[in-house]
Structures are given as C-alpha cells and as structure tokens.
Amino acid sequence: MLEIYRCARTYIWGFEYWAPQYTEINYRGHEGLLWKTDYAKLYLEYFPDLKPVREEKFKYTGEENVDSMFLLKKGS
C-alpha cells in the first residue's frame, strides 16, 4: 500500500476482496497468501490526505463474498 500511495500522482483505484474485518482466504490450498478486508478504509487510515471519491460493492452471484471497487484522491 505504501508503494502504491508513493507512486500515485492523483488517484488510487482499487478492486479488492472485501470484508468488514481481516479474513484469510485459502488460495489454491495455500495459507498466508491472501486476505480480504476493507482496503479503502485502510488506505484512508494510513494516509490522512486521501479523500474518498467513490466506492461500490459487488456481491458474488450465489455466494456471500463481496468485492469492493474504490477511487481515492490524494490531497495537496
């Protein structure tokens, strides 16, 4: 996240697995490689100059999983 923030000029766009709290996801039989959480919220907590532009959540068909697409703008 720090490197994404550092390299971004104006905007940060993300499309991530979403959950209200950190939740580990088994990735092809492996542990400790993939998590879901509220990444937009984490960015806003870690980088106070970021402002939310838009966020939408997309629920998987026939499942409880949700993805989050978000756009954040760097302040000056």
Image (spheres, rainbow, N blue to C red):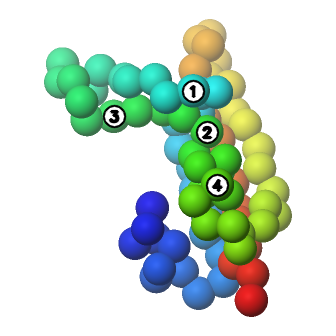
Q: From this viewpoint, which residue is outermost toward the right?
A: 53
Q: Which mark is residue 45?
A: 4
Tell me whether the residue at label 2 lies in contact with that at label 1, contact meaning CB atoms closer than 8 angstroms: yes
Task: Tell me the SS state at disc 3.
Answer: strand
Tags 3 and 1 in contact by the CB under 8 Å rule?
no
Q: Position of residue 71 (x, y in %)?
A: 70, 62
Tell me the number on the disc at residue 9. Answer: none
- Pointer 3 or 4: first along the chain: 3
| First in sequence: mark 4 vs mark 2 | 2
Q: Where is residue 60 drawn, in percent x and y?
A: 62, 23
- Residue placed under numbered mark 2 in the picture: 38
Neighbor class of circle 3 (other Cα within 10 Å; few <14, some 14-19, many 20+) is few
CA distance for labels 4 and 2: 11 Å
Residue beneath disc 3:
34
Between the C-alphas of marks 2 and 3, the distance is 14 Å
The amino acid type, in three-letter code, at marker 4 is Glu
Between the C-alphas of marks 3 and 1, the distance is 14 Å
Task: Tell me if mark 4 has few (under 14), some (14-19) or many (20+) residues whose alpha carbon lies within 10 angstroms of its own.
Answer: few
